[in-house]
Image (cartoon, rainbow, N blue to C red):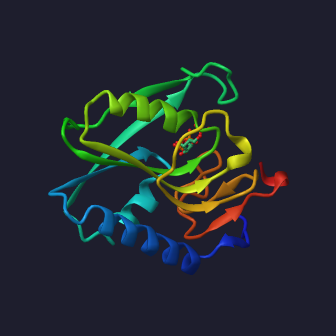
Amino acid sequence: MIALPPLMSEDVIRTRVEQLAGRINTDYANVSELVLVGVLTGSFIFLSDLARLLTVPHRVEFIAVSSYGSRESEDPESVRLLMDVRRSLEGEHVVLVEDIVDTGKTLAYLMRLLEARRPDSIKTCSLLHKPGRTEQEVDIDYLGFTISDSWVVGYGLDYAEKYRTLPYIAELPVEYR
Ligand code: PRP
């Protein structure tokens, strides 16, 4: 695997994840349980670091989606569910955890899906956001970093399933795509 210079170093990521966890700990200080729903696969490293910094009681669920054909599709329903959460979210306080919001289609789809499950509350958390790519507006309640429209890898993010376990985030140069 090629050596890529960090866009966000391990230290920078760690500091930001600590800040996000701090905000979540404050905001949910009075709830009996929080449900973190991680969107597979990209969120798994961010979620595991975030969850281990939480002092509020919480449980972890995962959900998996796929896009029909191209993610560039105009069809707002181009996202489909591959794997659901295991337990009911009714009456729960939910935080949906993403690694990146790109067009916004995945998060918009998941918000519609999970809001229909009648949780007590639902918020969104994403490590990265590419506002320049937005096609569907979605609120990101807990956001790590805003980035420009480049292909980023590491810390859960992949290119053709490679680089996910790189401990920092890097831009993948065009010649490697
Ligand atoms: C990525 C990312 C988000 C989604 C965001 O997932 O993890 O779930 O794309 O894109 P959107 O805002 O344009 O909908 P991907 O489909 O690459 O799967 P992965 O997490 O398994 O890598």
Q: Depth check: 86 or 26 in front?
A: 26
Quadrant of residue 152 in the image?
bottom right
Q: Residue at x 33, y 72 (%)?
A: 53
- Percent across and percent down for residue 141 are 47, 53
- Percent across and percent down for residue 174 are 83, 52
Question: Farthest residue in the left direction?
Answer: 32
Is the residue 60 above or below the residue 80 in the image?
below
Q: Residue at x 39, y 48 (%)?
A: 123
Q: Depth check: 130 or 3 in front?
A: 130
Q: Quadrant of the N terminus?
A: bottom right
- Percent across and percent down for residue 44 are 42, 55
Q: Residue at x 45, y 73 (%)?
A: 19
Quadrant of residue 75 in the image?
top right
Q: Residue at x 14, y 57 (%)?
A: 32
Decide if residue 147 is on the left or right side of residue 34: right
Question: Farthest residue in the right direction?
Answer: 175
> Can you tell me which quadrant of the image ligand 1 is in?
top right
- Percent across and percent down for residue 63 are 37, 39
Decide if residue 125 is on the left or right side of residue 56: right
Is the residue 76 above or below the residue 157 in the image?
above
Q: Depth check: 93 or 13 in front?
A: 93
Is the residue 30 above or below the residue 65 in the image?
below
Quadrant of residue 102 in the image?
top right
Question: Farthest residue in the bottom direction?
Answer: 11
Decide if residue 131 is on the left or right side of residue 118: right
Please tell me how many numbered marks the rendered image carries: 0
